Image (tube, grey):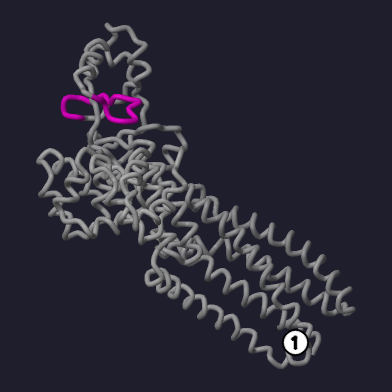
Amino acid sequence: MIINDNLLTKLDSALDSVTLNQIRHALNNLSPPDIAHQLETAPPKYRHVLWELIDPEISGEVLHDLSDEIQLEFLNKMDGAEVALLTEGLDVDDIVDILQQLPDQVIPEVLKAMSVQDRQRVESVLTYAEDTAGGLMDPEVITVRPDINVDVVLRYLRRFEEIPDITDNLFVVSRNDTFLGNLPISKLLTSSPSTTVREVMNTGVKAIDVNLIDSEVALRFQRYDLVSAPVIDDHNRLLGRITIDDVVDVIVEDADHSLLAMAGLSDTEDTFSSISRTAPRRAIWLGVNLITAIVASSAISLFEATLDKLVALAILMPIVASMGGVAGSQTLTVVIRGMALGQIERGNISWLLSKEFAVGIVNGLLYALLVGCIVSIWFQDIRMAIIIGLAMAINLIAAALTGTILPVILRSLKIDPALAGSVILTTITDIVGFVSFLGLAAVFLV
């Protein structure tokens, strides 16, 4: 992929010169995904200038390749007719992806400006939730009957000006559109012309239910190495197909969501968002963290008298809390990933809990011994070494158990574990670490 790294530099000087045509030429010589990349890496003040330079013939493809937030940034400045013109020629599923960024009251305006055929296809997909197989599917599919021969199928395909992108299979249906199987293009090209479709079709295809959530669709594609898959309704009627490019988008979006949610950020976060947008979003999560920090600090205040007598406790206290936080985050991340991959179910939660408990004990004892030795040498106090060793073991075990149980509980409460898990976990490990360390010190040292 070749991207003009000097584009923004040229644009900066072009704003006060006559070189905008050169910029337009350089920009439109890139592919739509590369143009979208240029827009996403450009500061906001340049984006709309670049957008105006894009040829109308490819602007719809560029818009589809942009992140949701930047898409919305451009869409908010268009009326329904402009959006309809922009999306003309795009695949139905790509059009739906764009329309789903618009407010509900604007979508009817866009649909009204479309041709009747496009409107019907788009409406058929819009009836399904965005995060389901129905919301991902493309209703434009090539279907054939099982009783015709390969020669007829080939002559039928030649009538098309072009076939849909990523077509690795034709779908075999009955006269009432009941899904029967698929016909791989590879078999079509290598079979005798007189062979019937029924003889070479694949009837073992696992069709995807239209209401299956998108993360489960992605797992199906990963598990069975699919390039495309048929989508059916409750009556086994073929509705459309999902292709690998849409599934890759789902995987990337889920990964972005998990990564950003663990920092309390929206998965539509724009790297170059304005200060007025970015600061309030982050301030909310900082406020949540402040509350949890105050809760943890209140646990320390219970042992104020103990801390006054032994300054060494204040020096060592962060070690216990920090180790617990890291251990808990490791477990939490593994469990959340397992949930995302569909690996964690009711039947194996108890085994996972036992395993993480054992890991917590092993690492707890290991680092209890290591830190105990360091502290005994550092402060020349065997009692202090025993206390921090015990507190370390307690907190690492508690962290392992919390990191395993917490996401399961949050998911059962319909709360996103990636969003809330890390904050709650850190608060729990801080409190357990502080209370165990200072509590043992209050008993044995004071």
Q: Which residue is mark 1?
A: 442
- Relative to 331, 138 lies left or right: left
- Relative to 103, 63 lies left or right: right
- Farthest front residue in view: 18
- Relative to 227, 345 lies left or right: right
Residue at left 17%, top 54%? Answer: 107
Coordinates of residue 348 in the picture (x, y in percent): 55, 51
**Looking at the picture, does residue 276 appear above or below residue 91?**
below
Q: Amino acid at mark 1?
A: Ala
Over which residues does the magenta segment extend?
Answer: 162-177
Q: Main secondary structure of the magenta part?
A: loop
**Looking at the picture, does residue 90 appear above or below residue 301?**
above
Residue 167 colored magenta? yes
Query: Which is more toward the observer, 385 or 6?
Result: 6
- Relative to 241, 361 lies left or right: right
Coordinates of residue 132 in the picture (x, y in percent): 31, 48
- Quadrant in the picture for residue 34: top left
Residue at left 71%, top 93%? Answer: 305
Coordinates of residue 370 in the picture (x, y in percent): 82, 65
- Quadrant in the picture for residue 196: top left
